[in-house]
Image: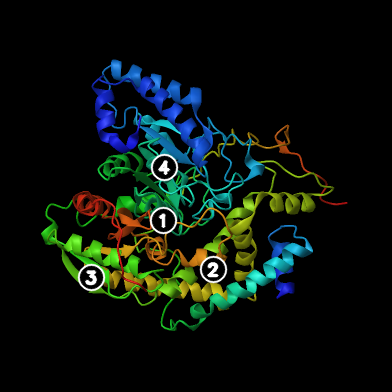
């Protein structure tokens, strides 16, 4: 279980210390136990649902539009010359 | 101004007729807000001069002969809605100085209708939760019982007489539970009726925009203002395609209310008695009672948790410190993401980010996520079957009295608190929490769930039913467990 949590934290891009992971592991174990009735539910005849109600999904017109980028960078901590400035990706 | 003594409709009427100046009203509102906030911890920020300017603009329009449906009505905004004039903190210290570049659709519409923003109300971290216990500024206290939580700071603002409307969000029941805890009306419209543009939602399937009010007759007016198609939220396109079977209720004796004979999970016999008492009061108005069965409540709750966690793990990925909010310095981009996100999330938002990632992984996808999607079908079929027999469904709104402010509740208990609110969350049905009495000195509400897109019908029924439930303090004796 610890391995799964570490991998999940890595994919979720959240830095967790060892204490955090231990605490999460205890919680996760209790959580999975609590979820048992979900696994026992008899829904073999059911298809997975993708949206809560059956109202029609309405598609918009397939029309190319100019993307408005005027707010790009508005709230960013580091934005220069139309680019988000970030630390190095490749060392 | 004490909004508990006058409805938003009457307030707007007075402002429209020139009997009351919006600016004078809002001055008093802001003063009251400041006093109450120091006691109850309701606001992340208050609007101050911005509110006064808005109120002056309303007064100018009235003088020019323009009539506004919500003229001068003070309202609060939950702090997961985007609002340019005030910081949108999303319940995280990493966004304490975040001023967004635009307003949420619902906020735009309320302001255009003449309503005035009082402030942004306290929320759990990233809006994930129904208690405000995960808020960086601490929980909002219950105006009726300050030793207990309010659940929703917007509902607390209403109960404290600060405002007349509260713009809220609800995923698993936060709006409805907060309304129950504070003794106000909390309304969750049908999914797709109200644009979510500008709501920093964490679950695309379940998060919805809703409204709370001290008077039920204010809700149809406010709903009319904020609902409708918005090309910026594709989910609203559905409401143009669907015609509600019934718009308004004329006669209570023509309808049936579904009820549950057994109420699993309710904390006490007193609460069960209150539910029965409420049902009897509704029946006394001429409404037929029909027993319905919801046998998958427990599975529905667990399916909701899995799907909500999975969606949160994806939706919350956008908060990486690059485009908005603060960032933690790091030597490389990967570490910037990881450290920033660790600093951004806490409590349930952190749990859902990690656990949700697991549910979508190879080890968890089929076993948990796909199973949850199948149970979602069961929930929808069960609710549809219930509505074949009744027009409205009466459910509890909460499992227990509001939690004490001190102490750390068990997280499983917090999940269980959503037992009766999750079905409507999952199916998109409209749901309204009405005050039904008191237990141990704290307000308790009940929930009326309506058919999809029959929001006007549900609200008109509630306006007729509410007075029968608004009796004096009900301290139910005996009962036991």
Q: Which mark is residue B388?
A: 3
The residue singled out by tag 2 in the image is B412
Residue B114 seen in this snapshot: yes
Task: Mark 4 and mark 2 in contact? Answer it, CB < 8 Å.
Answer: no
Q: Earlier in the sequence, mark 4 or mark 3?
A: 4
Report, in whole angstroms, how far the alpha carbon at label 3 lies from the one at label 2: 33 Å
Few, some or many C-alpha atoms within 10 Å of disc 4 (few <14, some 14-19, many ≥20)? Answer: many
Nearer to us of marks 4 and 2 is 2
The residue singled out by tag 1 in the image is B177
In the image, taking residue B10 as reference, residue B92 lies left or right, namely right
* Quadrant for the C terminus of chain B in the image: bottom left
The residue singled out by tag 4 in the image is B167
Q: Earlier in the sequence, mark 2 or mark 1?
A: 1
Q: Chain of mark 2?
A: B
| Outermost residue to the front | B478
Q: Which mark is residue B21?
A: none
Q: Residue at x 66, y 41 (%)?
A: B325
Report, in whole angstroms, how far the alpha carbon at label 4 lies from the one at label 3: 32 Å
Q: Nearer the viewer, residue B133 or B61?
A: B133
Nearer to us of marks 3 and 2 is 2
Are labels 4 and 2 assigned to the same chain? yes
Task: Mark 3 and mark 1 in contact? Answer it, CB < 8 Å.
Answer: no
Residue B430, horizontal then vertical, whole percent: 33, 56
Q: Chain of mark 1?
A: B
Q: Residue at x 57, y 45 (%)?
A: B90
In the image, taking residue B467 as reference, residue A43 lies left or right, namely right
């Amino acid at each position: 279980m610890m391995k799964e949590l570490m991998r999940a934290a890595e994919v979720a891009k959240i830095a967790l210390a060892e204490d955090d992971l231990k605490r999460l592991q205890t919680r996760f174990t209790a959580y999975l136990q609590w979820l048992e009735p979900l696994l026992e539910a008899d829904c073999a005849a059911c298809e997975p649902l993708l949206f809560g109600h059956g109202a029609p999904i309405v598609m918009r017109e397939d029309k190319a539009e100019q993307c408005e980028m005027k707010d790009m960078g508005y709230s960013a901590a580091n934005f220069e010359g139309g680019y988000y400035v970030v630390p190095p990706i490749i060392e | 101004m004490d909004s508990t003594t006058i409805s938003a409709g009457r307030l707007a009427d007075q402002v429209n007729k020139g009997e009351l100046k919006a600016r004078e009203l809002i001055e008093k509102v802001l003063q009251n807000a400041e006093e109450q906030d120091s006691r109850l911890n309701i606001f992340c920020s208050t609007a101050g001069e911005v509110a006064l300017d808005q109120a002056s603009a309303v007064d100018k329009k009235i003088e020019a002969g323009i009539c506004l449906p919500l003229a001068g009505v003070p309202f609060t905004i939950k702090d997961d809605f985007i609002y340019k004039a005030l910081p949108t903190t999303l319940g995280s210290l990493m966004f304490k100085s975040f001023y967004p570049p635009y307003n949420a659709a619902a906020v735009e519409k309320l302001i255009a209708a003449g309503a005035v923003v009082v402030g942004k109300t306290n929320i759990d971290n990233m809006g994930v939760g129904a208690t405000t216990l995960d808020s960086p500024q601490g929980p909002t206290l219950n105006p009726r019982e300050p030793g207990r939580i309010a659940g929703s700071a917007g509902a607390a603002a209403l109960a404290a007489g600060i405002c007349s409307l509260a713009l809220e969000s609800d995923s698993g029941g936060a709006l409805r539970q907060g309304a129950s805890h504070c003794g106000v009306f909390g309304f969750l419209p049908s999914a797709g009726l109200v644009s979510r543009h500008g709501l920093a939602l964490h679950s695309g399937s379940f998060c919805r925009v809703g409204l709370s009010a001290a008077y039920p007759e204010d809700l149809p007016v406010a709903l009319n203002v904020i609902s409708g198609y918005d090309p910026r939220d594709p989910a609203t396109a559905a409401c143009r395609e669907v015609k509600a079977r019934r718009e308004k209720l004329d006669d209570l004796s023509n309808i049936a209310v579904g009820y549950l004979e057994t109420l699993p999970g309710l904390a006490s016999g007193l609460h069960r008695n209150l539910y029965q008492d409420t049902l009897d009061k509704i029946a006394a108005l001429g409404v037929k009672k029909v027993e319905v069965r919801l046998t998958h409540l427990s599975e529905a709750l667990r399916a909701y948790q899995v799907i909500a966690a999975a969606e949160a793990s994806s939706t919350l990925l956008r908060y990486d410190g690059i485009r908005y909010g603060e960032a933690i310095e790091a030597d490389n981009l990967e570490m910037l993401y990881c450290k920033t996100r660790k600093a951004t999330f806490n409590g349930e938002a952190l749990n859902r980010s990690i656990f949700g990632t697991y549910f979508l992984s190879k080890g968890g996808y089929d076993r948990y996520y796909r199973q949850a999607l199948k149970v979602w079908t069961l929930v929808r079929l069960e609710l549809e079957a219930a509505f074949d027999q009744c027009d409205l469904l009466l459910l509890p709104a909460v499992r227990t009295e509001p939690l004490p402010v001190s102490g750390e509740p068990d997280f499983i208990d917090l999940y269980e608190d959503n037992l009766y609110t999750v079905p409507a969350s999952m199916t998109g049905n409209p749901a309204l929490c009405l005050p039904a009495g008191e237990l141990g000195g704290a307000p308790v509400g009940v929930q009326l769930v309506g058919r999809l897109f029959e929001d006007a019908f549900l609200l008109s029924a509630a306006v007729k039913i509410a007075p029968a439930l608004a009796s004096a303090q009900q301290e139910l004796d005996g009962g036991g467990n």
